[in-house]
Image (cartoon, rainbow, N blue to C red):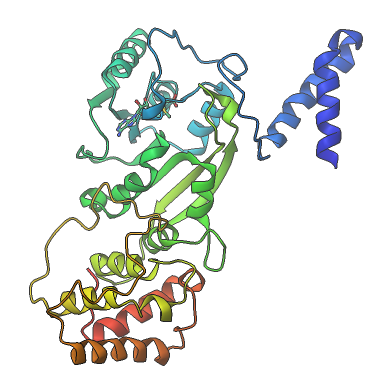
């Protein structure tokens, strides 16, 4: 109700400022800004905003066409950019990793508060624009630009990652940071601007409707904090979705678990997020796959996570139908025994009627331990 009233007043103020005495105009301007900040939290389904209505501020010379396919939505609001740099809590000794610096709106702020910035940018046009801007400011000796795909680039050691990333790579990038080969480097935190809905899933807890494999996997090795919401109108060109800034901090107390086993296990459990574990572990195809994995002597050594793997738990990688024909080599009686073993384990902890989205990581760890003890493996 108060929001509608607020909108009405803002609309009035926008239409008739000259009618107001100066003092009350200033007051209204102040209130307009404050109110705008409040409204930033609103779900705004007006996607008609474009370059003309975006709340621009940062320079953008339009010398080349922005490629939406590469997530090229530049953050142009100085207020939001300053907030990101402030909320990142940079130290003057920090090496910052920035993914997708674009034309450098965030980069120049990072360079002002840290020792060094390493930026990974896929588009050479952006790299050129960034380098000329940064050298114009005399900051180029502290910037290293890697031209390439962040998902395929080996990251150098860094203290903190701060970025307005292309949203299309959110899931594999977070997987790379937390589970990839570079995770040993022990960075302090990653402050990332993400699609709002994705960020909500990232901070979801067991029992929340958004809780999924992504949240379970991230929570195992990190803590996630929501820092602020950012309105789509703060970007050029204006995207269809709002954004949220989150801080991901690697945990120092990661539970003792084989991470490959863990990822395989959560992938299996979240095959069908809204089904019970009893139903999920009844699928014959899955049982056959688990049986084969558990029989094989040598385990493949590989990256913990394929860096392009989408592990947000929404993809349906498994066929829900019962398919025994795919595995003709499976002995039927052995398969029945194996299935009963799985069922027995689920029943022993009372999880057969539970949905995966209701289980905490402690529950998952306990269940995985029971499976592993019985020789059932997931990696
Ligand atoms: C959302 S824009 C952000 C630009 C800039 N940081 C800003 O806030 O104005 C994302 C940037 O990431 C770049 N990009 C897209 N895919 C990438 C990838 N796989 N690896 C590295 N950079 C990528 C785009 O070219 C673009 O410059």
In which quarter of the view is residue 289 placed?
bottom left
The residue depicted at 61 percent of the width and 19 percent of the height is: 55
Question: Picture coordinates of residue 100 (x, y %)?
Answer: 35, 29
**Quadrant of picture, ligand 1:** top left
At x 78% / y 19%, what residue is drawn?
Answer: 29
Q: Quadrant of residue 295?
A: bottom left
Task: Please provide percent x and percent y for residue 232.
Answer: 57, 30
In terms of depth relative to the viewer, which is nearer, 354 or 338? 338
Locate the C terminus and report the quarter of the image it occupies: bottom left
Residue drawn 36% across the image and 11% down it:
133
Which of the two residues, 250 or 309, is positioned nearer the viewer here?
309
Image vertical order of residue 65 relative to residue 274, above or below = above
In the image: residue 74, left or right of residue 77: left
Position in image of residue 72 (x %, y %): 41, 25
* Residue 27 seen in the figure: no
Look at the image and tell me in which quarter the N terminus lies: top right
- Toward the viewer: 90 or 103? 103
């Amino acid at each position: 109700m108060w929001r509608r009233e607020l909108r009405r007043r803002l609309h009035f103020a926008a239409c008739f400022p000259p009618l107001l005495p100066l003092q009350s105009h200033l007051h209204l301007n102040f209130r307009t800004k404050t109110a705008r900040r409040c409204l930033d939290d609103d779900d705004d389904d007006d996607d008609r905003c474009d370059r003309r209505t975006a709340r621009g501020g940062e320079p953008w010379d339009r010398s080349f066409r922005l490629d939406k396919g590469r997530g090229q939505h530049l953050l142009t609001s100085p207020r939001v950019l300053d907030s990101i740099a402030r909320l990142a809590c940079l130290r003057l000794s920090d090496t910052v990793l920035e993914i997708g610096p674009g034309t450098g709106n965030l980069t120049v702020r990072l360079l002002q508060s840290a020792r060094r910035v390493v930026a990974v940018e896929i588009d050479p046009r952006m790299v050129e624009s960034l380098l000329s801007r940064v050298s114009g400011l005399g900051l180029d000796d502290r910037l290293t630009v890697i031209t390439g795909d962040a998902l395929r680039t080996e990251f150098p050691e860094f203290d903190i990652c701060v970025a307005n990333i292309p949203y299309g790579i959110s899931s594999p990038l977070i997987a790379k940071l937390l589970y990839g080969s570079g995770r040993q480097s022990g960075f302090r935190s990653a402050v990332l601007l993400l699609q709002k809905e994705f960020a909500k899933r990232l901070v979801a807890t067991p029992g929340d409707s958004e809780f999924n494999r992504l949240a379970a996997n991230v929570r195992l090795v990190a803590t996630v904090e929501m820092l602020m919401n950012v309105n789509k109108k703060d970007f050029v060109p204006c995207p269809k979705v709002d954004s949220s800034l989150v801080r991901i901090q690697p945990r120092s107390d990661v539970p003792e678990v084989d991470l490959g086993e863990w990822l395989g296990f959560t992938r299996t459990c979240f095959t069908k997020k809204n089904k019970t574990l009893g139903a999920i572990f009844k699928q014959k195809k899955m049982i056959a796959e688990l049986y084969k994995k558990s029989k094989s002597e040598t385990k493949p050594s590989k990256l913990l996570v394929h860096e392009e793997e989408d592990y947000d738990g929404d993809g349906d990688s498994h066929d829900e139908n019962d398919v025994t024909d795919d595995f003709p080599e499976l002995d039927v009686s052995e398969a029945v025994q194996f299935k009963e073993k799985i069922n027995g384990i689920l029943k022993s902890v009372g999880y057969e009627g539970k949905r995966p989205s209701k289980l905490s990581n402690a529950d998952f760890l306990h269940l995985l331990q029971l499976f592993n003890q019985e020789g059932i493996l997931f990696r």
